[in-house]
Amino acid sequence: MNPLENLINRAEGLITKLEALLPIANIPVDWSTIAWRWVAKSGKGELQAITHPHAIQLDSILFADRQKAEIVRNTRQFLQGLPANNVLLTGARGTGKSTLVKALLTAYSSQGLRMIEVERHDLVHLAEIVSLIRDRPEKFIIFCDDLTFEANDEGYKALKVVLDGSIANTSDNVLVYATSNRKNLMPETFADNLPTKNADGEIRPNDTIEEKTALAERFGLWLSFYSFDQDEYLQIAANWLTTFQIAFDAHARSAALDFSLTRGARSGRVAYQFARDYAGKQKLTS
């Protein structure tokens, strides 16, 4: 490489580093849609419109009547400007936690409900997200799916601020709805929570454990979901098949059981996957 090429490469590298340090330009948000995803890159982010959000009906969610009634009541309070709580949905995989949150958008978007999906690693941007929507007339649910944290994760601190509230970050038009497979949201072994305790020389490590595992307690409403038995799984599979205009006869019942055996699980997610697979096979033309 000649000296000129070397100089050009060094200059380009310097420009790249400088661009990362510059404040992000204000990217206009498409407020005409009802759902967004926070997309971050190199420490900068924007609300990216979801033009075709998944339309799920509340009636399609079975064997979660109590949980459904609670979260619907809380959401209606929120939409009517009444006191409402942040919500944590915990329990077995595939039991309808995420589906229930998404179904709320289908049911209540006409009443001003909006949803912003934020990945766990982007929670450090929560204050920025809240500042973008603070003065909007709509009501926003910040949706965090499959929420868990590792030790020393900075995201939980940003989430704690939004849940607890502070002078800078509280907003009456924002709630956080999160799903998780564990209630504590943190690794539960001593070693997982304190991987660097010797290096840090922490005097009271139990305080750190308590601070992190208590994050779940900052959600005002907890909803627990449980695994389905065989009969419940079959009813869910039958319900999903009807949405594809396929009868749940003896052959479909046998196929649903075989499908669950190959997956090693009887969950709502498996029932939905079976329905799509079975309906596709029945309608496939040669």
Image: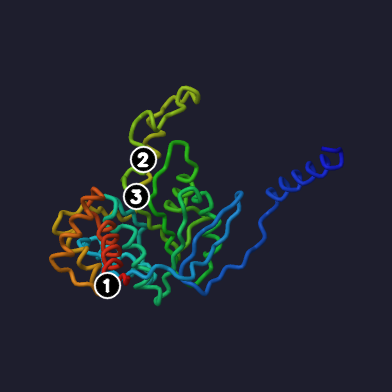
Q: In terms of depth relative to the viewer, which is nearer, 219 or 272? A: 272
Q: Report crowding for label 1: few under 14, some 14 to 19, many 20 or more residues within 10 A (C-alpha).
A: few
Looking at the rendered structure, the kind of residue marked 2 is Thr
CA neighbours of label 2 inside 10 A, class few (<14), some (14 to 19), many (20+): some
Foreground disc of the pair 3, 2:
3
- Amino acid at the residue labelled 3: Ser
Q: How many marks?
A: 3
In the rendered image, which residue does mark 1 sit on?
A: 243
Q: Is residue 248 left or right of residue 4?
A: left
Q: Label for residue 213? A: 2
Structural distance between the alpha carbons of marks 3 and 2: 13 Å
Residue 138 drawn at (x, y percent): 46, 71
In front: 281, or 183? 281
Q: Residues within 10 Å of mark 3 (few under 14, many from 20)?
A: many
The residue depicted at 29 percent of the width and 62 percent of the height is: 277
> Which mark is first along the chain, 1 or 3?
3
Q: Earlier in the sequence, mark 2 or mark 1?
A: 2
Residue farthest front in this picture = 286
Q: Quadrant of the N terminus?
A: top right
Query: What percent of the width, then of the height, locates residue 37?
Result: 49, 61
Question: Helix, strand, or loop for circle 2?
Answer: helix
Q: Earlier in the sequence, mark 3 or mark 2?
A: 3
Amino acid marked by disc 1: Thr
Percent position (x, y) of residue 74? 32, 64
Which residue is denoted by mark 3 in the rendering? 180
Measured in 3D between alpha carbons, the distance from the residue under mark 3 to the one under mark 1, in whole angstroms, is 28 Å
Residue 12 placed where, x, y %? 77, 46
Q: Quadrant of residue 233?
A: bottom left
